[in-house]
Image: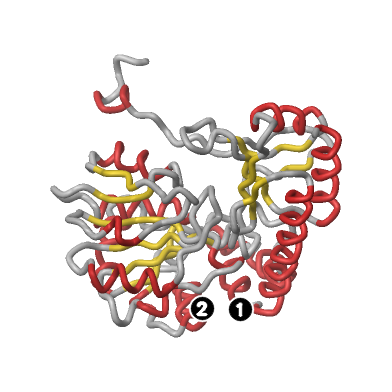
Amino acid sequence: MSRFWSAFVHNLEPYVPGEQPKMANLVKLNTNENPYGPSPKVLEAIRLGVSDTLRLYPDPAAHDLKQAIADYYLVNTANVFIGNGSDEVLGHIFHALFQHELPLLFPDITYSFYPVYCQLYKIDYQTIPLTADFNIDVDDYLQSNGGIVFPNPNAPTGCLLALADIERLLQKNTDSVVVVDEAYIDFGGETAIALIGRYPNLLVTQTFSKSRSLAGMRIGFAVGHSDLIEALVRVKDSFNSYPLDSLAIAAGTAAIKDKAYFRETCDKVISSREKVITSLNELGFEVLPSAANFVFARHPEIDAAEIAAGLRKEGVIVRHFNKRRIDQFLRITIGTPTENQHMLSVLDTLI
């Protein structure tokens, strides 16, 4: 620790991202990346964008991408905010909308960046336990709060909260902002964006990293009432007026316009997920219902850390969270059929 640090830095416990190992012949199933590459139209848009115009600053409002997102979800551009990955978008949300006297509410098992943001921005928070079967019960959130945030599907469980339950929560929680973090919604859920016209306190975040195969481009966005969007823009423009570079704007615009490729790759992942779940069940694993591009599984007789270590020795990387309630689960990203089969074959040998 340095004596030159600001005082608060000494106590920060940063978010730990998924491992990005440099191993040959690796089957990488630990960070929920899409196994299929970006749309060919995205690659062409990037190629066309590589020119001497890169000497110019990008559009600070990323208008072309914002318009494409608005058209896709049938909203106005005033309802759309764009940032450098959904993590940055969420960071601005915590800063702009959750700094209140009452505590922020989110699940006890959820995206581990949430408590990090609370620590960074000095936000009081309260975790709400998932049910015994690892689901969110909206009735548990019907209490005084300074905001509510949760992923849907939840991470790392993959469990989906029905849109009707989200609307019921919004109907009974009108005095604070509710953020639905939809990083994985395209793999089996129904987006809550359709509800923003009726609920001015609803904000929905999404990312291009998963279903649109652009984790390397860092594109995220939020959709909600224009008053909420204005708060995010104020924070953004006080932090970084140019969060997306020109190539990212071009790539994102092409990605969201190529609906056919998007649907094709999502359907492939969903089909593979169901086959992986069936195979894991046959190997004796308990697998939580998943609406994401990963599964959350545990074996009743073999320690999860031991299984993860055994897979790693064979060049297969999955995610193990050494945390209370879930330390016997493995989060396994859905890969290509070949990658999935290799992972399952190694598991069969281990078990």
Residue that badge 1 annotates: 257
Whether residue 233 appears in this view of the structure is: no
Judged left or right of residue 213, residue 78 is left
Q: Do the residues labelled 2 and 1 touch (CB within 8 Å)?
A: yes
How packed mark 1 is, by other alpha carbons closer than 10 Å (few <14, some 14-19, many 20 or more), is some
Q: Where is residue 283 in the image (x, y as percent from the top left)?
A: 78, 45
Residue found 23% across the figure and 66% down from its top: 173
Picture quadrant where residue 203 is located: bottom left
Residue at position x 29%, y 81% in the image = 198
In the rendered image, residue 168, in percent from the top left (x then y), is placed at: 32, 72
Residue flagged by tag 1: what amino acid is it?
Lys
Q: Which of 258 and 125 is in front in this view?
A: 125
Q: How crowded is mark 2: few (under 14 residues within 10 Å), some or many (20 or more)?
A: some
Nearest to N terminus: mark 2 or mark 1: 2
- In the foreground, 218 or 153: 153
Where residue 351 appears, as percent x and y from the top left, is: 80, 34
Whether residue 105 is visible, yes or no, is yes
Q: Is 148 located above or below residue 186 in the figure? A: above
What is the count of numbered marks? Answer: 2
Helix, strand or loop for disc 2: helix
> Is 349 in front, or is 79?
349
Q: Name the residue under label 2.
A: 68
